[in-house]
Image (cartoon, helix red, strand yellow):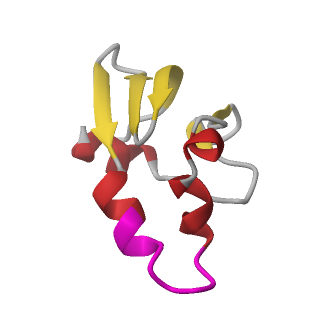
Amino acid sequence: MLHSIKNIKSAEPYNLTLEFDSGEVKTIDLEEKLIEWGRTPDSKFKYLLDPANFKKVKINPEIQTIYWENGIDFCPDVLYSLG
């Protein structure tokens, strides 16, 4: 099943509580993934390890997922499975 994100309920470092199109609300803990993906010197994920930047998450209404201004986005199905 394909999922999309309707609403960001909360964005606290490093957890997102998201409402999906099914009506389900899931909290996703991204801390371990961000640390793992942010290990390389040129990783864009380091940006999200700053709590102030992490909280700047937005919804892209065209593709119905979350994103940050530095170009990082996540597949809604991956987020759903992590929640």
Q: Which residue is at a point 55% across and 66% down the rendered structure image?
A: 45
Q: Is residue 58 left or right of residue 17?
A: right
Q: Which residue is at a point 67% across and 48% down the rendered structure image?
A: 68
Location of residue 33 in the rendering, given as x and y in whole percent from the top left corner = 34, 62
Q: Quadrant of the C terminus?
A: top left
Q: Is residue 7 left or right of residue 21?
A: right
**Magenta stretch: includes residue 39:** yes
Q: Is residue 57 among the parts visible in the rendering?
A: yes
What secondary structure prevails in the magenta region?
Answer: loop
Find residue 79 and report its image quarter: top left
Q: Quadrant of the N terminus?
A: top left
Location of residue 80 in the rendering, given as x and y in whole percent from the top left corner = 30, 39
The stretch in magenta equals 35-43
Q: Which residue is at a point 29% across and 59% down the rendered structure image?
A: 32
Location of residue 59 in the rendering, given as x and y in whole percent from the top left corner = 64, 32
Find residue 76 and report its image quarter: top left
Location of residue 65 in the rendering, given as x and y in whole percent from the top left corner = 55, 40
**Magenta stretch: includes residue 75:** no
Q: Nearer the viewer, residue 15 or 67?
A: 15
Toward the right, the furthest residue is 69
Q: Is residue 3 above or below residue 67?
A: above
Q: Is residue 73 among the parts visible in the rendering?
A: no
Toward the bottom, the furthest residue is 41
The total number of labels drawn is 0
Q: Which residue is at a point 58% across and 86% down the rendered structure image?
A: 41
Q: Is residue 29 left or right of residue 35?
A: left
Q: Nearer the viewer, residue 67 or 29?
A: 29
